[in-house]
Amino acid sequence: MLSRVANHVYWLGRYLERAEGMTRTMSVHDQMLMDLSEFERTPTWYQLIAINSTEQIFAEHFDELTEQNVLQFLTTSLDNPSSIASTLAGVRYNLRACRSIVPKAMYELANQVCLEAADVSNNNVTHAKRRNFLRSVELQLLAVSGATAGGMSRNEAFLFMRIGQVIERADMSSRILDVRSANLIRNHNAESLTPYENTQWVAILQSLKAFQMYMSETRRPINGPEVLNFVLKNLKHPKSVRFCIQRLAGFIERLPGTDDLQLQVAQLLSKVDQADVHQLAKDQVELHQFLDSLQIALSQISDNFSTHFFPAPESVQEKNEPANNDQVQTQEQR
Amino acid sequence: MNCWSDYQTDFHDELLDKNGNPRLASAALFNYLNSLSNEDLNARKQAADLAIRQMGITFSVYSEAGNIDREWPFDIIPRIIESREWNQVHKGLEQRLKALNHFINDLYHQQQIVKDGIVPAALFASSQNFRQQCVGVKPPHGVWAHICGSDLVRDSDGILYVLEDNLRVPSGVSYMLENRAVMKRTLPEVFKECTVLPVNDYVQNLRQTLCSLSDSYQPVLCVLTPGVFNSAYFEHAFLAQQLGAVLVEGSDLVVDDDDCVYIRNVEGFQKVDVIYRRVDDEFLDPDVFRADSTLGARGLMRAWKAGKVAIANAPGAGVADDKVVYTYVPDIIRYYLNEEPILPNVPTWRCEDEDSREHVLANLSSLVVKPANESGGYGMLVGPHSTQQQCEEFATLIKQNPRNYIAQPTLGLSTSPTLTEKGIVARHVDLRPFVLQGESVNVTTGGLTRVAMVEGSLVVNSSQGGGSKDTWIVDTTDRADADAMREPEA
């Protein structure tokens, strides 16, 4: 596989995962809100902005923190690099460059979800339509995963896509933990959770679509340390941070000349293993710092990975047209 | 209401005879469409549009606001040609490409055809696409143009003429293949009623043609694209995917000191055997052609000349893609193959010949004037549809540079029924079959039918509002035999 295309495949994996994560998170949040009083709804929507650290961009484009503004920012706004519209635009951009190497069915499904999302106007973000939209995008992205898993050879392209996917997923899981746990720990009372707190711990698991598996595996009442332990360290659930990094280690091992990267990933793995969930569940500042350091480590791994495999660092993340666009255009095809 | 009741055409029609009855090969389609209500028809059209959108069949249009991906314009009523007629066309196209390849090879070697006085030396000396750098090169099998897209039109006399041969980087074959895929989803019932010959052997034939250019047992094939912003990027990606080729841009290629071409892979460099390039000659190699080109690779010509890589179409093949050379093709066929041309040319005046020029200048308002080297339908004068002023401008252009212009009579291009907002109406069509030559010669079963969607218009180019149709070569042998047996009784 060409290095240039490998770069696009890697980002395709990341954007697909990010889009899935965003849709899932919003969908779960939407459900959760119905259990909260109206007074509390808007501030909790704001959590979703915090998950992607896009508070500042929001402030630049909106004056008021209304539900409508937040939702527009999260779904259709192209100013927000983490909105569903933006992540799907990222999917489409990278998909175009990978078209000749991904299975046709996968291309068509991914293309379709991008087109549908691009058609959604801001008006459609209102409540009833919103749920259908999120549900539809989520299901279509699951279909994309299925078409990829079922139709693509386990070749280099697949490996690079999976590497993008697990890095993004580990990052997303740690962000969700970070933001969602923030106002829980503030009123921490380990013995008796208020009904609302319970709702929010459940929401963490639901945001990761891990609630059902958590319940069947831990068979314990919902509580902070257990949830943290599950999301950070579980060995079997594909959304757990530990699981993603373990996978990442396995993938990197298969690529030649990656000794340094392998070491970096191993260090991150042991960092997660050594984390004391009881301590972290008690102390919000410590938890935040810990999760922050995870995200930084992941981002360094991603950077080093890109430098190693994509030597001419063309920033495919930015949708820049090439400098020689004029020349490309004079190549009229008959 | 019968969807055909208002159908009218003053031209030869591809599906109906002059009494408005379906031709033998179109009867099944005609009857089926008759059984559909207008709502049904429109629903089918919408389904086809949706399929095209979902399958991501696009082409890009350049505009001031940047490049826009447009959905490929498709008409759901196919254009039908009887297999008996097609067999002849097929032979004619094979004959034509074989002769053209002899001609190109001769031009870059002994130029025997010039010495024998069949074509004038000035012809290629003045051709924009004659490449001095290619003189003496011996590509595999002596073949230069491996992929040719010839445009065919049917005049009022019912005869198919060759309008031009595209030997540089002809595009459209992916749309031919996808049109069939969409058609199968749109009118599946009709396929049961008549024998539509399949088109999808093209990809295997193309692969075989490209592989035949290399000695390697499992050659590494590349499709060289100008990039994702090119108007035909969809096709480049489609063909790479179908061929199992690597889709590369110029910057992915490296020519090493051993004169071999390599691609930059994740695991290092990999040698390339055959490049199916979709980049024009002048951008291929900045060392040899345009020095500012970023679309090709430095040293590519060196590698090609050394025989370390095959390039399809070979650099310099475009010399025969010249509308003045076109006028000599019948002579070229006779000269190299010692055969009579099977497919006729459209009668053409060369403006460089003084007598012809006089005729052209005196009759501009009834002629079509074309520059020798342009493509995509640009820089043309369509006399009957032009103003006095436009004709005068062209008269000046012709006098300034007669070598650069040819003129043809305005043809009564055939029509084919097409679904529009006004119902089923007659629209002008042409046909672009694709011909392959490597070790052997192959022709697509039919080709890409392009249709001018605007009433009365003759412009079929998708960049200028043209549409397309699936092209059916229908095997009517059984029915024709049955008819022949019935005839004595009738």
Image (cartoon, coloured by chain):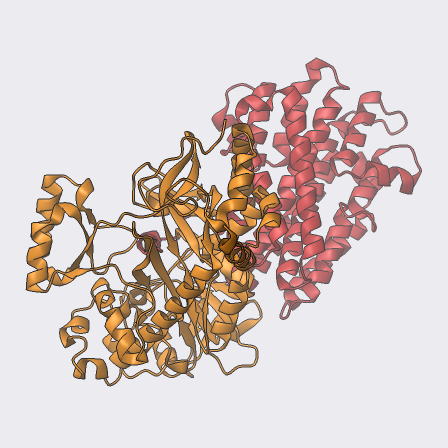
Chain colours: A red, B orange
In the rendered image, the vertical position of residue B422 relative to residue B279, given as above or below:
above
Please provide percent x and percent y for residue B215. Answer: 50, 83
Judge by depth and name the residue closer to the eye, B314 or A114.
Answer: B314
Residue furthest toward the right? A219
Left or right for A114, reference A154: left
> Is residue B56 visible in this depiction of the protein?
no
Left or right for A48, reference B27: right
For the point 65% across and 20% down, the residue is A127
Please provide percent x and percent y for residue B294. Answer: 34, 62
Left or right for A277, reference B403: right
Total numbered circles: 0
> Is residue A224 visible in this depiction of the protein?
yes
Residue furthest toward the front? B489
Please provide percent x and percent y for residue A123. Answer: 55, 21
In the rendered image, the vertical position of residue B251 relative to residue B414, given as above or below:
below
Please provide percent x and percent y for residue A113. Answer: 60, 39
In the rendered image, the vertical position of residue A239 relative to residue A331, given as above or below:
above
For the point 10% across and 40% down, the residue is B388
Judge by depth and name the residue closer to the eye, B9 or B141.
Answer: B9
Judge by depth and name the residue closer to the eye, A295 or B68.
Answer: B68
Q: Residue A152 sits in which quadrant?
A: bottom right
Q: Residue A101 sits in which quadrant?
A: bottom right
